[in-house]
Image (spheres, rainbow, N blue to C red):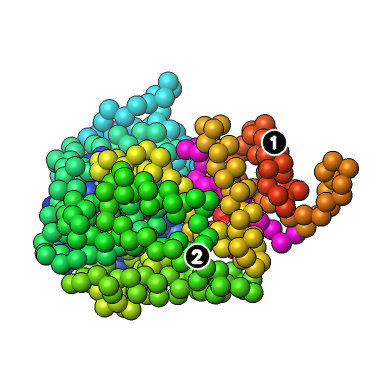
Amino acid sequence: MPPTETVVVLDFGSQYAQLIARRVREQKVFARILPYSAPLADIAALNPVGIILSGGPANVYADNAPQGDAGIFTLGVPILGICYGCQWLCEELGGTVQRAARREFGAATLTITAPDELLDGLATATDGGLPVWMSHGDQIVKLPAGFKTLAQTATCPHAAMAQPEKKFYGVQFHPEVAHTPCGKDLLHNFLYRICGAQGNWEMRSFVEDAVAAAREKIGGANVVLALSGGVDSTVVALLLQRTVGARLHCIFVDNGVLRKNEYAKVVENYRRDFQLNLIPVSAGKIFLDRLAGVADPETKRKIIGHTFIDIFAEEARKIADCKFLAQGTLYPDVIESVAAHGGPTAVIKSHHNVGGLPEKLGFELVEPLRWLFKDEVRALGAELGMPEASIWRHPFPGPGLAVRIVGEVTAARVAVLQEADEIVMQEIQAAGWYRKVWQAFAVLLPVASVGVMGDERTYENTVALRVVDSLDGMTADWSRLPYDLLAKISGRIINEVRGVNRVVYDISSKPPSTIEWE
Ligand code: XMP
C-alpha cells in the first residue's frame, strides 16, 4: 500500500532510524525503514527516490561490521549516509575510516568549506558556523575517488562530503536530531533538490488510499474491531466506517478495570459523536472473579488477556459473514528493528492487547495504520473529525487499573483507585498540564501507614502519583510538576478518597524503572 514516492531508510542499528523516517515524512515524503541487510531486490522493488543510510554503533572496519548490499550504488538513486552510514558508504566506495584521535560527542560547530546543494541556505549562527550534533569515535581520513569535502568541524576534517554527479552524500553529524537545528533544511535539500521529490505524502491522500485499499480487501464482508477507547482503535474504527459503514462491528468490553465511568462515557460518546455500530459488553464481574487472589503482575495480564479473547470471540462469532478482524497496529510495531549490539535480529512485535485473537478466530487481519507513526495517527484522527480530547488522550494499558493496583485486585480497591485517578485527571487537565505530559495516573500501593484525621488515628492506603514525560513510552522521565499542583492533587485525594491517607510522588525515570508499576 505505500505510495509510489518512497525514501528507503536502511537501518544500521541506529537508535535514530525511526527518527530519520519521521523527519522525512514531516517533509511530506513517505519513508520506509528496512534492515541494512535487506536484499537489493527488495530495495529496488520500492522504486525509491532516495536512500538514507542510518548511523549505528559498530566500527565499519571491524570484522563483523554491518554491511549493506553495495548494489544500491548502482541503482542511480541519490544516497545520503549519516554517521556510520556515511562511513560505510565511504569505505564501500574506496575511502578510508579510522579511529579518531579525539572522539566527538555532543554539540559541534560545522564550517562549510565548499558550497553545495546539500548545505545550501542552511541557517548559520552569528559566527557563521552551523551548530550540529555529533556522536562518533571513528572518522573519515581519506575520501573515495570523485568525492569532495563540503564541511568540517574542529576535530573532524570531512564532516560532510559529496560526489554530486552521482548524487552520493555523507554527513558525520546527525541531521535528524533536534540538536542539529539546520537538519530539517538539510533533509529538505536532499529530498527536494537532490532526489527531486514531489512531496505527495499527506493525510488527506492517505485516507483516500487507505479507504480504497480496505474496500478492495474487505468487499461485502463484515469486519469486527476491538474498540478500547484509545486513539489507535478509534482511528481504525472511523477509517473503516468510511469504508464499510455499518458492516464494521466495534466490540467494546468493560473489563472492570477501566477508569471511573469510562465504559458509560465511551458507549454514549461513540454512538452519539461517531454513530459507530457499537457492541458494548459489560463483563467486569467475570474479569474480577478470575483475578481474585492473584497478585503477580504477569499473571494478571495473562488472565485479563485470555478473558478478553474469550469474551471478544464469543461476541464476534455472533456476527454473520464476518471475515475480517481490524487492528490498530502501528508502524513501530512492524518495523524489523536491527539490534544495536549486532543484528540482524528481526523483532516484530504483535499487538500486545489483542494478541492471539486472529489465530483463535481464523479471521483475516485488516491493519490500516500499519504504515503510520503515532503522530501521524493523531493527524489522521484530526482529518477524520475526532475531537481534540480523544486525539490527545493519554495511553492507557490494556490491563487497565489492574496493573496500577499493586497486589490483589478487588472491586473495592478498583473503586478506591478510580476515585484517586479521577482527581489526578481533573487537576492535571485544569492546570493545563494534560497535553504537556505523556501519562499521569495514580497507583494504589499495598502499603498502609499511620495518619491522623481530626483527632482520630488512621491506618490506611498509600497512593503513588506517577506523571512522566516521554516521546514514545520507551524511555521516560518524571515530570517536574509545580509543587502547588502536587499539593492540590495530594490534598484532594486524601480528603476525598476514603481509604487513602498518604500520597507520594514517583521520581524515577525509565530506565531503570518502568512507567507502570507492574
Ligand atoms: P512500561 O510500564 O513498560 O510502559 O514502561 C510503557 C508504555 O506501555 C504501556 N503499557 C501497556 N500497554 N498493555 C498495554 O496495552 C500492557 O500490558 C502495558 N503495560 C504497559 C504503559 O502505560 C506505557 O504507556
Looking at marks 1 and 2 on the same chain, the residue that comes earlier in the sequence is marked by: 2
- Whole-angstrom CA distance, mark 1 to mark 2, is 33 Å
Residue 329 versus residue 441: which sits nearer the camera?
Answer: 441
Q: Quadrant of the rendered structure where residue 244 is?
A: bottom left
Label 2, residues with CA under 10 Å away: few <14, some 14-19, many ≥20: some
- Closer to the camera: disc 1 or disc 2? 2
The dot on residue 284 is 2
Which residue is most to the top? Answer: 126
Left or right: 30, with 397 as reference point: left
Residue 370 versus residue 49: which sits nearer the camera?
Answer: 370
Does residue 70 show up?
A: no
Indicate the position of residue 86 as horizontal and vertical percent values: 33, 52
The dot on residue 243 is none
Magenta stretch mostly in which secondary structure? strand
Q: Is residue 435 magenta?
A: yes
Which residue does the image show at 51% across and 62% down from the upper left?
A: 256
Residue type at the position of mark 2: Gly
Quadrant holding the N terminus? bottom left
Residue 195 versus residue 229: which sits nearer the camera?
Answer: 229
Does residue 387 show up?
A: yes
Residue type at the position of mark 1: Ala
The dot on residue 487 is 1
Indicate the position of residue 459 as horizontal and vertical percent values: 81, 55
Residue 214 against residue 148 in the figure, above or below: below
Region in magenta: 434-447
Are the residues tagged 1 and 2 within 8 Å (C-beta)? no
Which residue does the image show at 24% across and 37% down from the upper left?
A: 189
